[in-house]
Amino acid sequence: MDIGPVPWLGPLLLVSLWASSAPASLLRRLGEHILRFQESSALGLGLGPDSVTLPKEGWLEQPLDPFNASDRRSLLQRYWVNDQHWTSQDGPVFLHLGGEGSLGPGSVMRGHPANLAPIWGALVISLEHRFYGLSIPAEGLDMAQLRFLSSRHALADAASAHLTLSRLFNVSSTSPWICFGGSYAGSLAAWARLKFPHLFFASIASSAPVRATLDFSKYNDVVSRSLMNTAIGGSLECRAAASAAFAEVERRLRASRGARAALSVELGACGSLERAEDQAELLGALQALVGGAVQYDGQAGAPLSVRQLCRFLLGDRGNCRGNCSGPAPYRGLRRAVQVVTHGLGQRCLSISRAETVAQLRVTELQVSSVGDRQWLYQTCTEFGYYVTCEVPGCPFSQLPALPSELELCEQVFGLSTSSVAQAVAQTNSYYGGQTPGATQVLFVNGDTDPWHVLSVTQPLGPSEPALLIPSASHCLDMAPERPSDSPGLRLARQKISQQLQTWLGLAKESQVRGVV
């Protein structure tokens, strides 16, 4: 069922996206910031004189519990439509699946799949993930509601949306639907083809971490390698400087109360560093800052690149802007913190574990604009993905350790470590991990992206292709094209287009035979 605008949701749009938040969510805030930047740019381009049609916003009434027919409760789910390239009712439909955040109108205007739509006359639809953005139940985010939040529920929503939107837009029953998604939504795109092959003809899964894992120590393995990658501005010296900077932070944390107070001021922390749990939060935030520079390297809207970070860590005394206390790598890390916090509109770096827990426990809608509580719930009940640095050779601090990460599941949701471990195992059993077995899914990854180690980077068969883009970061293939794009990225986009052409050719043959 399609309905009009929902008045009670409107005020959520006014919530500050960069409100004080847990350091552990810094990566998510970077991702949200970059996505908003790119979507805003896309809308700016879409509103130009050559624009034919603006994206349309719509709402679907979805069952809150699609697996229980006797439960009549419903959820309002937002979607966006760009039909300016749609040439015929039997043309393809490109379904852009949303992930763990808000999805705006720019999602159907620029980047792929929007860039590919004119070639094949496709209808482009984006579907916001349940419990994120504005697609949140009015009852809030308590545990009674959150039990209806999972990847399985999201896939049921995609299947339901396929049927409802086909009727609403009079899409031909022979039209092939192609799923697109990046990051967690990339996994959803692959799984949509796996679980509903009769509805979705093919999928493009970008940076999709299809293997759940409790201890994601390999994340920092990739970060470490990327800091040495000369193609993106890294070097052996940069990696060594990063390690030295973290060692200096830890040395100051172990020193006197005065040293910790000075450290708090110099790194722009929001509070005191006297508690051990807050010191671990600080170190986690600094790791996320360095990891974010790698994960989103070279992307429009990213406040810090690997090249800039390395220049800071190895730079001269100009980096400290008049206060040159401490060794150069430490001063460079300070400068990196300033650049990122300023870029995200944050006054200081949140390091209070108690505040983190308190914020994650709040169930009211107005404080959940970026979905921290919801995503933590999904990591505790499905995926894990807890980034650690406890293995030998990791260049950062060993804090926060895995037990600290898992403790949040207990403190916020009452979920034990054993239940989280069991949930991760069940997810891999249900979807197949890195061998999902879905045909006509193209996995696209960048080797700079730390998440690629949980994805599919080698073809699994003739109908299970994969692309690994040299020196490319997280979901970079999905970003709007730029003059600075590398030859490897341009070639990858060509291969994506060619693969899509092959699949749509197969779909056309099936249409002719009348078997789709």
Image (cartoon, grey):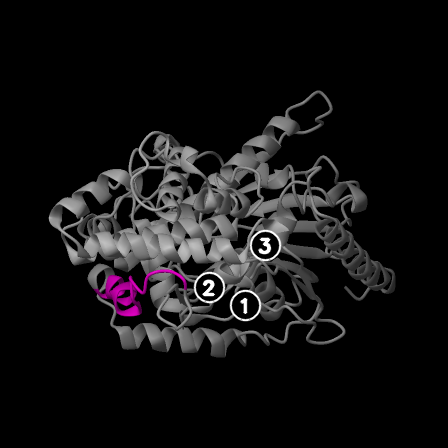
* Residue 339 point in image, percent of width and height: 41, 36
Q: Position of residue 483 (x, y in %)?
A: 71, 37
Amino acid at dot 2: Tyr
Q: Is residue 343 depicted above or below 284 in this figure?
A: above
Q: Residue at x 18, y 47 (%)?
A: 260
Q: Residues within 10 Å of mark 2 (few under 14, many from 20)?
A: many
Q: Can you tell which quarter of the image residue 407 is in?
A: bottom left
Residues at discs 3 and 1 in contact (Cβ within 8 Å): no
- Between marks 2 and 3, how big is the CA–CA gap? 21 Å
- Is residue 158 found left or right of 115 in the rendered image? left
* SS class, disc 3: strand
Q: Where is mark 2, residue-wise?
A: 219
Q: Which mark is residue 181?
A: 3
Q: Position of residue 331 (x, y in %)?
A: 36, 42
Mark 3 and mark 1: Cα distance apart in space: 18 Å
**Can residue 259 be found in the magenta stretch?**
no
Q: Amino acid at mark 1?
A: Val
Q: Say which label, 2 or 3, has the lower sequence index.
A: 3
Find disc 1 in the rendering and name its residue.
453
**Residue type marked 3:** Gly
